[in-house]
Amino acid sequence: MERKQEFNIMRILFFILFSSFAFSQSFITELADKTVGKFLYDKNIKIVNDSIDIFLRVNSKGYCYALDFVSNDKTKFTLSDQAIAHKVNKDFEWIYNDSITVESLKYDEYQSCGDYLSHRGRNHRYDNYVNHANSEKQIYIILNSDKGYAVLVEPDDVDFLTPNNEGESNSSIDDWIEFQTLQEGISFLKSDEVIFKANKLRQVQEDIQRKNEEMRKFPISSLELPYKFRFGMSEQTVANHLKEIFKSYTKHEITSSRFANAKKKRVYKEMEYVITENTTYLKIELCFLYDKIIKIGYSHWDKNHSRLYDLDLKIQSKLTAIKNEYGLLFDILFSNSQIEGAHQIWSISENERLIFEEKFFEEEKFQRSKEIENKIGNKM
């Protein structure tokens, strides 16, 4: 009987010690340092414990974008915000606002990450946010509610995450490997299999980065576009070019409210050129920034103002080939409208420059307005 009681006491002590170890400060930070922000595996990993579940989430690149410690159904107690923060790291400078969660939700991975404590579905990962702390290359986020608590660890480096503005993506994966004990999970993370897979995944991304860097050095002005246009042509060069290949054309400036300040400063202009051959009309829209083409739109029409899809399709095919080859340099929009729009291609870097210029002129305009207002006010 005494031996049985002693055994039960030992079991209780083991449980307490094991739970304490599993959710201790050193364990959380050490596991984060080994996994978060690194190329890890091609599947998510879940480690089940007596008091918490540990989720190691990777995206389609194999990059570990989240290490989540979440109290499970076996947990019969709750902790205060201060107690959770102390278990993570009592020396961290904890910040009590939601700025970090807003930043995280800019990426598809966290939009698709679901929730732990609110049970409300997509985009509710941070519903029970308490505070967060930055520690070198990791961000520690605390959640707390009457349903339990969680510590989410995310990388500070977002180079391998997917921005939401890239449209639909397959950044997240649904495959999981599950371990029933902490020891099994840790052993797997230290195994040669994981180390080999991580190195392979990292090498793939390094090769992609190297190719991307090489592509960005490509001189876009050397690329011949449909109807032998090139980015960087001046308005006068365009006039000479059209006379050479079409003999005659008409043109007019497109008036719109887009980039009004840059237009007013005469650093940006939108022009439409119309070329007529028999009953076919080719319309070319050109955007000039500092007298250099940064965007081109193409469309074909008949005398009844109907789109000529056979010719449009040829343009679309050529632009698609350019997009597939030089996707980092160009954005493309294909118009399916029968009454308006054009297939368009533009330089990403030059378009960003235009946006910057417009903001600069808008701020300059605002400052001038404030100066005039102050001068008038000073004369009161």
Image (tube, rainbow, N blue to C red):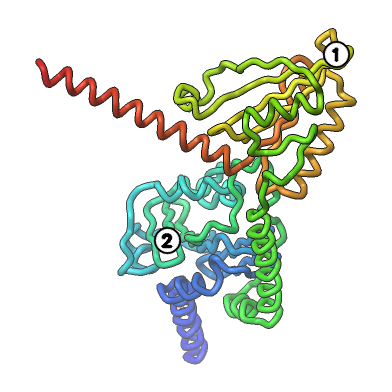
Residue at the image position 71 percent from the left and 28 percent from the top: 240
Is 379 left or right of 283, judged from the image as shown?
A: left
Residue that extends furthest to the bottom in the rendered view of this protein: 3
Residue that extends furthest to the top in the rendered view of this protein: 304
Q: How many marks?
A: 2
Judge whether residue 177 can be spotted in this image. no
Residue at the image position 12 percent from the left and 21 percent from the top: 378
The crowd level at tag 2 (other Cα within 10 Å; few <14, some 14-19, many 20+) is: few
Q: Who comes first in sequence, dot 2 or dot 1?
A: 2
For badge 2, the amino acid type reads: Phe
Dot label at residue 312: none
Judge whether residue 9 can be spotted in this image. yes
Query: Quadrant where the C terminus lies?
Result: top left
Q: Is 257 rendered above or below residue 208?
A: above
| Image location (x, y in percent) of residue 303 | 85, 9
Indicate the quadrant where residue 368 lies.
top left
For badge 1, the amino acid type reads: Asp
Asked whether 202 or 297 is in front, the reply is 297
Q: Secondary structure at mark 2?
A: loop
Q: Is 245 rendered above or below residue 72?
A: above
| Image location (x, y in percent) of residue 372 | 23, 21
Residue at the image position 83 percent from the left and 13 percent from the top: 306
Q: Is 90 rendered above or below residue 106?
A: below
Q: Secondary structure at mark 1?
A: strand
* Residue that mark 2 sits on: 77
Residue at the image position 50 percent from the left and 50 percent from the top: 104
* Residue that mark 1 sits on: 302
